[in-house]
Image (cartoon, rainbow, N blue to C red):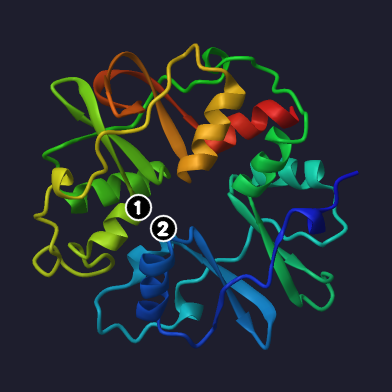
Amino acid sequence: MNPVEKVMTPDPVTVSVDTHATKVRSIFREEGFRTILVVSENRLQGAVTRGDMMNISSTKSNIAARGIMEKPRVIATPDMDLIHLAQEIMKAGTVYAPVVESPDNMHLVGIVTVADILRKFLYNGLQPDHETLEGIVTSNVVTCNYNDLISHVWNRMDESGYSGLPVMKDDKIIGIITRMDIIRSRHVRMGFESDSEMQGSIKVEKVMKTPPVVVTPQTPTSEAGEIILEYDIGRIPVVENPVYVKREPRRAKEADLVGIVSREDILWSYIR
C-alpha cells in the first residue's frame, strides 16, 4: 500500500477566506499554482483554481476568496491508499485533493495533485495499459487560431472545461495557450465586466507559447508522462509531420495536429 502521506506536499500555500481575490490572482501569477487552498484557522474551507479567476471583475475588486472559492470534489487523509485516491480524483474530474487530518476536524496538512501521483507511478515500476499514445490520444481537439481574441479564447476554455488550447495557423499547430498564460499576461481583466471594460482585443499570438512541445502517436506513454512532468504542462499535442526546432528537438515550429493527451489520460492508463 502506498499511503497519500508519502506523496503529498505538506504545508501547502494557502489563503484565508478573507483574502482579497486580487491578492489570490497575484499569487497565481507569481507562483504558477494550479490550485490555492482556502482556510480558516488552518481548517479547510475551499479552493480557488485558475478557472475561478474569471470571477474577478477588476484590479479594484473587493471580492474575497470565500466569494470565488469552490468546494473540493475529493478530500484525502494521510493514510488513504494512493491508487484509490487516484481513482477518486479521476472519477470526480478534478486535478487535486486537499489532505486533512480527518473528516471530523478538517485540519489541513497537505495537498496531492495529479502530477504528484503520476510522478510516483512513473518512477515506481508501474506499467501503463497502453505502451504508446495511440491507444489514449483524444482526436477531437478544441483549438483556437493565432488571431483569435483572448477574451473569446477564455470563454472557449470556460465552456469546454479545457485549461489549454492548441493554437492553429493555416491548419498547422504553431503554439499553445493556457489559462495561466492569460492570467499572467495582464492583458485581460477577466470576469463579470462588460465587453467595453475588458481589454480583450489582444490576440492569441501575443500571449501564446511557441513553439509548442509535441509528441507523436508512436511516443511511449511513459515518455509522454515524463515530458509532461519535466515541462510542468497539463497536456501535450499529438502531431504528425513535425518540423522540429534544431536546438530543442521536442518543440515543433509547425506540425499536423492529430490529437492531444493530458496528464489525466496518462494517469488513467496506469490505474485502470
Quick check: 182 left or right of 137? left
Q: Mark 2 points at which residue?
A: 51
In depth, the one of 112 and 188 nearer the eye is 112
Label 1 SS: helix
Q: Residue, x 32% and y 72% (percent of image)?
A: 56
Location of residue 171 in the rendering, given as x and y in whole percent from the top left corner: 18, 20
Q: Which of marks 1 and 2 is nearer the N terminus?
A: 2
**Mark 1: amino acid:** Arg
**Mark 2: amino acid:** Gly
Label 2 SS: helix
Q: Quadrant of the C terminus?
A: top right
Location of residue 237 in the rendering, given as x and y in whole percent from the top left corner: 39, 27
**What is the quadrant of residue 98 in the picture?**
bottom right
Q: In which quarter of the image is the N terminus?
A: top right
In depth, the one of 164 and 121 nearer the eye is 121
Location of residue 114 in the rendering, given as x and y in whole percent from the top left corner: 62, 46
**What is the quadrant of residue 183 in the picture?**
bottom left
Quick check: 149 left or right of 39? left
Is any part of residue 74 visible from this angle?
A: yes
Location of residue 68 in the rendering, given as x and y in whole percent from the top left corner: 45, 72
Is any part of residue 91 visible from this angle?
A: no
